[in-house]
Image (cartoon, rainbow, N blue to C red):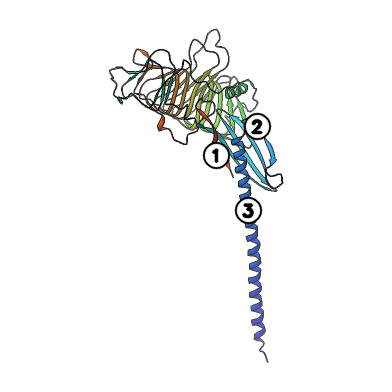
């Protein structure tokens, strides 16, 4: 005869077995859900990357208005792709979705450097030699006038550099610079002709952050000069003005674009942006522009009865990573100028359709394309004289990408910078 306590033991054993079985069922359920979630995530990631590759492989205007389609003609692999004009670069967005799951990436697009066109220096041929003085150093291939390169004694400085003068191949330059890309200039011109509605002030805000998945946000100051300070400006944001915009050192900017008649940047500014002006860009001393930044003068109209000289000025001890260029559609008597102060450091490219002036101890890791050099001594100007200037084409990172505006841009598009992702 069984004792009554045996029944309790059976019940407890059954309860334990039931709990174990329930735990296995619940674990299997959650494992299955997590597996399916991971499978969907991996599939969406593959679809996003496919979208990125499509944007990199197709012509620039193919997805300017956006396009949503299925990669494999089913409802499980849908992507939405878009590419927008963003200064000297383009910005692409790839969104993959399935049912309620959505992943996205936004990125800027750059171009590799064409090794056949790349050079540390391109100086057009105006039938005068290139003169080197002081501790001038040029490393990389160069395009120089037929008159060649020579040494000179300037400001009590004899040439103290490498006796080879140029450490690289010497080629003969032409009478004009290789042109900037016409298609990109047309985009700039079209943008300048458009009316951009939006906010007229940012003074009452602590920050303006706009995703590249949303429409571009415009702030149009119109004819009122603006001094912008103590604010954070990030992302898909364009500031425009018919007069002057001043960026204070207290401004935090990232990836934005500024279009104005003239632009001023105060001492101590740090940021990453693209600045475009019709007349002038003035950068005070000790400013830092992170890669990929751009400073550009763009003038598409006629010079006028009293022409003004377009100029980009970088004050002493500034550092800049990216592209600096000047462009005017119709040449004027006063050529556009890029002026570099003492101890300026540039990592990237300088393209001066007119004159490049420097004082002393300027360093460029990358390339300089210019129609003319102008060296300023204490009381005299010298044409095509380089004093203590360091040009090093090999000092540029092998991962550096340029915009298609530049004449040395290659054919292959790559991801320049990941902007947003989830």
Q: Does residue 369 appear in this view?
A: yes
For marks 3 and 2, the one nearer the N-term is 3
Where disc 3 sits, the SS reads: helix
Which one is earlier in the sequence, the residue at label 3 or at label 1? 3
**Disc 3 designates what residue?**
39
Q: Residue at x 31, y 22 (%)?
A: 134
Farthest top residue in view: 305
Residue 229: percent from left, percent from top: 51, 29
69, 187: nearer the viewer: 69
Task: Kindly identify the residue that appears in the image at 27 percent across and 17 percent down.
Answer: 156
In three-dimensional space, the C-alpha distance between marks 3 and 1, rounded to whole angstroms, equals 24 Å
Q: Which residue is at the far bottom?
A: 1
> What numbered label is drawn on residue 374?
none
User: CA gap, disc 2 to disc 1?
Assistant: 21 Å
Between marks 3 and 2, how big is the CA–CA gap? 31 Å
Q: Quadrant of residue 12?
A: bottom right
**In what element is the residue under mark 2?**
loop
Residue 318 occupies quadrant = top left
Q: Local crowd at mark 3 within 10 Å, few (<14), some, or many (≥20)?
A: few
> Which is nearer the eye, 220 or 116?
116
Nearer the viewer's eye, disc 2 or disc 1? Answer: 2
Q: Nearer the viewer, mark 3 or mark 2?
A: 2
In the rendered image, residue 420, in percent from the top left (x then y), is placed at: 57, 40
Q: Residues within 10 Å of mark 2 (few under 14, many from 20)?
A: few
Could you say which disc has been placed on residue 62 in the image?
Answer: 2
Residue 45 in the image: above or below residue 81: below
Lower sequence index among marks 2 and 1: 2
User: Where is the C terminus found, in terms of image quarters?
Assistant: top right
Q: Nearer the viewer, residue 363 or 289?
A: 363
Judging by the rendered image, the residue that carries numbered circle 1 is: 418
Q: Position of residue 105 (x, y in %)?
A: 59, 41
Placement of the N terminus among the 4 image quadrants: bottom right
């Amino acid at each position: 005869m069984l004792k009554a306590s045996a029944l309790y033991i059976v019940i407890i054993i059954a309860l334990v077995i039931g709990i174990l079985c329930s735990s296995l069922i619940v674990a299997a359920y959650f494992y299955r859900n997590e597996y399916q979630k991971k499978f969907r995530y991996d599939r969406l990631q593959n679809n996003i990357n496919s979208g990125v590759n499509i944007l990199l492989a197709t012509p620039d205007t193919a997805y300017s208005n956006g396009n949503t389609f299925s990669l494999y003609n089913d409802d499980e692999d849908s992507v939405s792709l878009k590419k927008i004009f963003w200064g000297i670069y383009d910005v692409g967005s790839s969104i993959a979705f399935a049912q309620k799951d959505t992943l996205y990436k936004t990125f800027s697009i750059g171009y590799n450097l064409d090794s056949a066109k790349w050079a540390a220096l391109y100086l057009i041929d105006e039938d005068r030699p290139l003169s080197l003085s002081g501790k001038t150093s040029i490393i990389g291939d160069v395009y120089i006038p037929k008159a060649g390169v020579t040494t000179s004694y300037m400001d009590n400085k004899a040439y103290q550099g490498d006796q080879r003068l140029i450490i690289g191949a010497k080629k003969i330059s032409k009478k004009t610079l290789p042109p900037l890309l016409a298609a990109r200039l047309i985009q700039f011109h079209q943008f300048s002709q458009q009316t951009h509605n939006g906010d007229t002030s940012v003074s009452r805000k602590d920050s303006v952050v706009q995703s590249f998945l949303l429409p571009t946000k415009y702030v149009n100051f119109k004819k009122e000069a603006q001094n912008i300070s103590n604010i954070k400006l990030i992302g898909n944001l364009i500031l425009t003005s018919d007069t002057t915009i001043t960026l204070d050192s207290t401004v935090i900017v990232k990836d934005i674009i500024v279009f104005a008649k003239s632009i001023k940047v105060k001492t101590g500014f740090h940021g990453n942006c693209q600045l475009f002006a019709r007349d002038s860009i003035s950068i005070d001393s000790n400013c830092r522009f992170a890669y990929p930044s751009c400073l550009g003068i763009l003038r598409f109209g006629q010079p006028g009865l009293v022409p003004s000289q377009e100029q980009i000025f970088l004050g002493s001890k500034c550092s800049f990573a990216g592209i600096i260029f000047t462009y005017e559609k119709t040449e004027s008597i006063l050529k556009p100028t890029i002026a570099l102060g003492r101890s300026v450091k540039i990592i990237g490219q300088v393209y001066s359709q007119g004159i490049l002036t420097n004082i002393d101890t300027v360093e460029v890791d990358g390339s300089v394309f210019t129609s003319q050099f102008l060296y300023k001594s204490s009381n005299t100007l010298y044409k095509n004289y380089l004093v203590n200037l360091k040009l090093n084409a090999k000092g540029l990172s092998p991962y550096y990408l340029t915009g298609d505006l530049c004449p040395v841009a290659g054919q292959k598009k790559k991801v320049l910078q990941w902007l947003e992702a989830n």
